[in-house]
Image (spheres, rainbow, N blue to C red):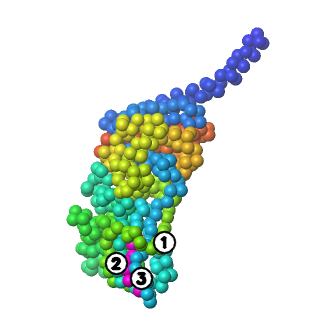
Amino acid sequence: MKINLIACILFILFYLPAFWQVFPQSSIQEKLDKILSNSFFESTLAAVDVYDLTGKEIIYQKNNRYLLHPASNMKILTSAAGLVFLGPDYNFETTFYYKGDIDDGVLDGDLYVVGGFDPAFSIQDLDYFIDAIDSLGIKKIKGNIFADVSRMDTMYWGEGWMWDDDPSTDSPYLSSLNINYNSVEVFLLGTEPGRKAQIILNPYSKYFNVYNEAVTVSPDEDNSYSITRDWMNKKNTVVAKGKVKKGRMITGDEEPQSLNVFRPDLYFLTLFKETLQRKGIKVEGKSDNFWLPYDAIYLRTISRPFAEIIIPLDKKSINLIAEMVLYALAEKYYGKPATAKNGIKVINNFISLIGMSPEKYNLVDGSGLSHYNLVSAELILEVLKYMYYSEPGLYKVLVESFPIAGVDGTLAKRMNGTSAENNVKAKTGTITGVSALSGYITSQSGRLIAFSILIENFARGTSTARNFQDEICKILVEY
């Protein structure tokens, strides 16, 4: 009798861990099934793939091979391919040269700037080059300022981008030479009732014309206004209309209204010329595009490593950065001029590298803005698995670039105050009718989980789709 009792105890102790492993997994599957059986999904598609990286086992799969739009989850592929094929130390550069003789503070020649796909170059960076010009004693430039943008093709938008998304900064105009994310901030300030409101541009530049029909009204009236750009005619004319309360600065959800800028290369040159003039350096010539002469003299370079720009790429989901990574991939492996199609070839090579078949999917851009992109939750999950298992060093760079639930980036205001807060590091994705969330979860038991949730085909349910994603994450944290 004692022997049987001891045997039963040993049996229970030996198999109890297995029982505990099976039970929570089946319980989680039931909970996820219940979420995805909601009436919302009667007309909306959901694809889910979840994998326990610690235990090396599938946790949950539903429609994981369906081809759906990734939205900004496309940036996971772009980021991962960039880390593997460019490396975190790859530099995105902007380089300045000059040609001509310098005599008595006068450059009898031209300045040249060569765009090297740096998406994060800012107007403040111009000071670094102007210091170099000043160190040569130059106070006057008799020639021109030229931009060499020959390292990429002339396609200023991605394939399948929506024409009526213009002038949103989510649809930036593309160039190998970029500045201020190829955008301008617009503020609208109420003055005196009956008078026009004041338009303030940041940065201020004569590159923009202003058409102002915004009128100041008394403080007890409601604000009713619009700020846009004459995008239909491809003009950089800022247009403001409507009513603005006296003494109130309208900034759209308490932030500046940002607009994309047409011809960012010329925008760069204009800001450069204006900054030179503010610093007391006169420029007599014009600003235009031209190839860098073979005998131009090197001046200075500003470079930014991929490990630096991948942070805003994924945390803030900046489309311009993703597209510049795509072009950098294209140039490195297929030469100049870089094209989006050649960049996609490199990403397809990455898909082959992780053991998947690129011919099963359709990719056209680096950011996921195009509705032409078609991927599966399975593919995204395999990317996440590959980076964790096969590229542990690069995995750390990738996961640290993802938004953290309830903390920062595009997840700063999601899952706050829940068990998922600070335990979900994932890339969001949103375009019309599409919501995506994929990344990594640290569960309460210490397990690391990779997951991908793609939801699409809803008319007005973005917040609802996100709520379902958040609920799934909270359940997985309990695993």
Q: In terms of sequence position, does the residue under pointer 1 or pointer 3 come before the other?
A: 3
- Mark 1–mark 3 contact, CB under 8 Å? no
Q: Is residue 112 magenta?
A: yes
| Farthest right residue in view | 2
Mark 2 vs mark 1, CA separation in Å: 18 Å
* Part of the protein shown in magenta: 106-113
| Quarter of the figure with residue 291 | bottom left
Of residues 423 and 9, the one drawn nearer to the viewer in this rendering:
423
**Residue type beneath disc 2:** Asn
Marker disc for residue 221 = none
| Quarter of the figure with residue 209 | bottom left
Of residues 107 and 304, the one drawn nearer to the viewer in this rendering:
107
Marker disc for residue 144 = 2
Residue 217 x %, y %: 29, 75
The residue shown at (49%, 77%) is: 132
Q: In terms of sequence position, does the residue under pointer 3 or pointer 2 come before the other?
A: 3
- Vertical placement of residue 63 versus 131, above or below: above
The residue shown at (61%, 28%) is: 20
Q: Is residue 139 magenta?
A: no
Label 1 Cα crowd, 10 Å radius (few <14 / some 14-19 / many 20+): some
Can you identify the residue that label 1 sits on?
Answer: 300
Mark 1 vs mark 3, CA separation in Å: 18 Å
Residue 96 x %, y %: 44, 71
The residue shown at (50%, 62%) is: 304
| Farthest front residue in view | 295
